[in-house]
Amino acid sequence: RVETLTNTPVDSLIKRDGIWVAQLGERELTARYVVIGTGRLTGQKRPNFPYRGYKAHFRGEIEGLQMHCYKGAYLGISQVAPGTLNVACLSKGPCDPNALLPYPLEPLFDLLEVSAPEFGIRPVPSWKNALFVGDAAGTVAPICGEGLAMGITSGVMAAEHILAERAEQCRAA
């Protein structure tokens, strides 16, 4: 039996005799497996925002993807439509991405600028029969453009893993 709860605070989650026990107010739930999809885990420090992200479209044509590395920054150029290039830049602190362009380009739109947090793989608790999906450990890089797809894919992978493990346990019994 599977029960999905949303917008439901979990007061505590412990393992008792190999079974997960979740306390939800007065209600107690038990499970052999838990799939944790909470976004950034509670208790993890709020991220710094040391990076600046820039994006703009320019007129032009190129083949493939161009990546240009600079001290404290990188800049990528890719074709997104005929006659239109996407230029994206990530820098440690403010910079002028137009000054980093390897050749002159004609802008089509104003430059979009955002703050970006620190990113990278963070430690995830190693809990038996607990699977972290989506960005439960804050590991999806900011502005990756694939956060939702990664969340859905990791949920499907978690379900497939649980089903395969349960099928193996049934065959062994």
Image: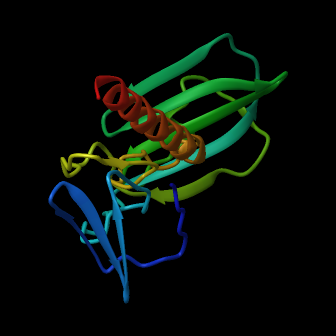
In the rendered structure, the answer to whether residue 134 lies left or right of residue 148 reads left
Residue at 76% over, 23% down: 60
The image shows residue 121, relative to residue 135, as above or below, that is: above
Query: In this view, which residue lies farthest toward the right?
Result: 82
Residue at 32% over, 40% down: 72
Residue at 45% over, 43% down: 90
Number of labels in the image equals 0
Residue 54 locus on image (x, y percent): 55, 47
Residue 50 locus on image (x, y percent): 33, 57
Scheme of colours in the image: rainbow
Residue 27 locus on image (x, y percent): 39, 83
Residue 74 locus on image (x, y percent): 42, 33
Query: In this view, which residue lies farthest toward the left?
Result: 17
Residue at 32% over, 64% down: 41
Query: In this view, which residue lies farthest toward the bottom?
Result: 26
Quadrant position of the C terminus in the picture: top left
Q: Nearer the viewer, residue 148 or 131?
A: 131
Q: Nearer the viewer, residue 120 or 124?
A: 124
